[in-house]
Image: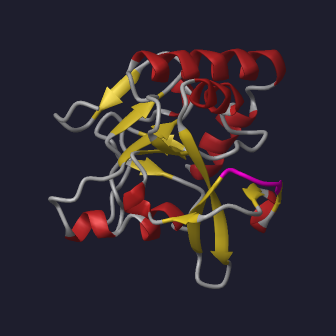
Amino acid sequence: MRRDLRARRQAIRGRVRRQKGRLLARHIAALGLLQTGRRIGLYLATAEEIDTTPLLELARRHGCLIALPRVISRRRDRMRFFDLTGRIQRGAFGILEPQGGAMRAARELDVVFMPLVGFDARGNRIGMGRGFYDRLFAYRLRLTHCRRPLLVGLAYAVQQVAALPSASHDVPVDAIVTESSTLWFDQRTP
């Protein structure tokens, strides 16, 4: 299933990919998630993921403080978010990562936008299979009263499937935003 879903997103390229990235950014702006001073966790998309460049630019214009993920241990599949203040270069797995900036604890972030390989209408998701985001936000499974940050998956609409399995270690997202819709899985408002 992961291979099929990756093929779906790899098929979207060039001008269409850039257009869908702009539509995604507009949807997120309309949700009111980008506010001055908010700490935003964001990722720099790979060529097969929905383009996050328009969202990054929009977050900057709204005065958000942006942090990007950086793999801190490949052996233990650990990552942390670091303020976007310095250079960016390819890190683990060829992903663009910040090289400087202060490390941010997960709970210091207000909203985290995360990549997805696939999702369903119940909020189940699959990523690339290493569990980086699940490990970082595992505390949300134990501390049900602690809901910070708001976790928002970003994907193309074609990445939605009828149903996905869910394991006990999977950290659910609060919402998924695509270029054409938003699905909320919690009654809270942003």
Residue at the location (79% across, 64% down)?
Answer: 91
Q: Main secondary structure of the magenta part?
A: loop
Q: Which residues, given as a range, are shown in magenta? A: 84-88
Q: Quadrant of residue 23?
A: top right
Residue at the location (35% across, 36% down)?
Answer: 175
* Residue 87 drawn in magenta: yes
Q: Give above or below for 81 relative to 118.
A: below
Q: Quadrant of residue 99?
A: bottom right
Q: Give above or below for 12 relative to 9.
A: above
- Depth order, front residue of 145/179: 145
- Depth order, front residue of 117/72: 72
Q: Give above or below for 46 relative to 25.
A: below
- Quarter of the image that includes the C terminus: top left
- Depth order, front residue of 77/38: 38
Residue at the location (70% across, 44% down)?
Answer: 44
Q: Position of residue 93 (x, y in %)?
A: 77, 64
Q: Position of residue 118 (x, y in %)?
A: 51, 42
Q: Position of residue 11 (x, y in %)?
A: 75, 29
Residue at the location (43% across, 62% down)?
Answer: 106
* Residue 2 drawn in magenta: no
Q: Position of residue 133 (x, y in %)?
A: 49, 61
| In the image: residue 49, left or right of residue 78 | right
Q: Residue furthest bottom?
A: 75
